[in-house]
Image (spheres, helix red, strand yellow):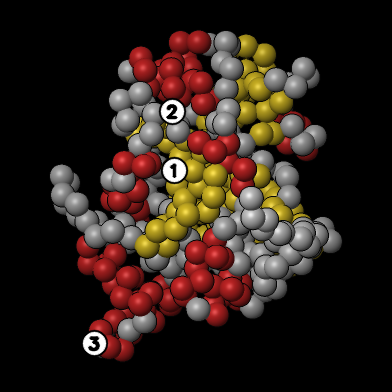
Amino acid sequence: MLISQMLGEDDTIRVVARNGARARVVNGARSVYALAMEAARTGVGLAALIERKGGGETVDLEAAYRKGLMLSPINHPDPAHLHLTGTGLTHLGSASTRDSMHKKLEGGDEQLTDSMKMFRMGLEGGKPAAGTVGVQPEWFYKGNGTMVVAPGAPLVSPSFAEDGGEEPEVAGIYVIGDDRQPFRVGFALSNEFSDHVTERVNYLWLAHSKLRNASFGPEILVGDLPADIGGTSRILRGGRTLWEKPFVSGEANMSHTVANLEHHHFKYAVFRQPGDVHVHMFGTATLSFADGVRTEAGDVFEIGADDFGLPLRNALEVEKPEAVTVTAL
């Protein structure tokens, strides 16, 4: 099942669900967030709850997308209670990249960068046996709900940024129940938009490079994550394809299990506050920046994979400089 949110004619949220091509408004659903919290409180699975409520009007999601009516597939009434986070060095990458990595891993620790050490730790301990805890991944924070950009809306790069590049990823979508336990709503495509030039200067600037907008959706896949996901990431400039490359995700292409990534995120009590929403991005091995592409304002990022329904599209915009002054009180 795929679920999404769009604006209705009265500017209210309409929750849409589909199995296949036919998309219908979910009866009585105020938002995906409200549905998810109801499912968590009642113990009824989200898909079962949607089936129970039933479908109403049929909608054309692609037409709504073209009209700019698609919303992020989940939000929180208070954006400060939605958390954008992610993990890195979690994907095996292409065969050639993997071979290169393994050759480097044959040397001693003193020959490895910190990134390569982290990658090796994931290879050796990122997929633990059931019931055990594996090695923790690289982790980063991107911001709260104020940083979320709806599908179709522009990703805004700060005026001081050195780069604004796409990262095609799968994100886990979660709500925290009243009992402080996390519940997974499903999975969505995401663009973990980052400043790769800043990151490359010094890896300790990774935190700076990640404090950027992000977009996810347009639809959430409810249910299990496919083990082997294949999609396409492309950049359009002036309506023409500037760059295009396949990307892969799913546990068959990762050095960590999803359960291991979830454990090391939600082990922190601060991320188990009742009612909060979490959008946690699982990483990628495919970047246009790695192929020497420098993006420009007006470029359009498009990330698509069949399992996730509609592709995620966002244009790049660069904000105007803004003076910031700290004033003593």
Q: Residues within 10 Å of mark 3 (few under 14, many from 20)?
A: few
Q: Is residue 257 left or right of residue 33?
A: left
Where residue 3 is drawn, which disc sits there? none
Instruction: Specify which label sits upstream in the sequence, 3 or 2.
Output: 3
Residue 255 horizontal/vertical position (percent): 32, 61
Residue labelled with disc 1:
172
Residue at 59% across, 17% down: 30
Instruction: Specify which label sits upstream in the sequence, 1 or 2.
Output: 1
Residue at 32% across, 30% down: 180
- Which of the two marks, 3 or 2, is nearer to us in this view? 2
- Which of the two marks, 1 or 2, is nearer to us in this view? 2
Q: Is residue 214 left or right of residue 224?
A: right
Q: Is residue 160 left or right of residue 306?
A: right
Q: CA distance from mark 3 to mark 2?
A: 46 Å
Residue 66 horizontal/vertical position (percent): 78, 38
Question: At numbered mark 1, what does the secondary structure look like: helix, strand or loop?
Answer: strand
Residue 256 horizontal/vertical position (percent): 31, 57
Where on the picture, by quarter, is residue 196? bottom right
Where residue 275 is drawn, which disc sits there? 2
Where on the picture, by quarter, is residue 109? bottom left
Query: 216 or 58, which is in the foreground?
Result: 216
Q: Is residue 101 left or right of residue 246?
A: left
Q: Residues within 10 Å of mark 1 (few under 14, many from 20)?
A: many
Residue labelled with disc 3:
108
Q: Is residue 160 above or below residue 81?
A: below
Q: Is residue 255 above or below residue 64?
A: below
Q: Amino acid at mark 3?
A: Gly
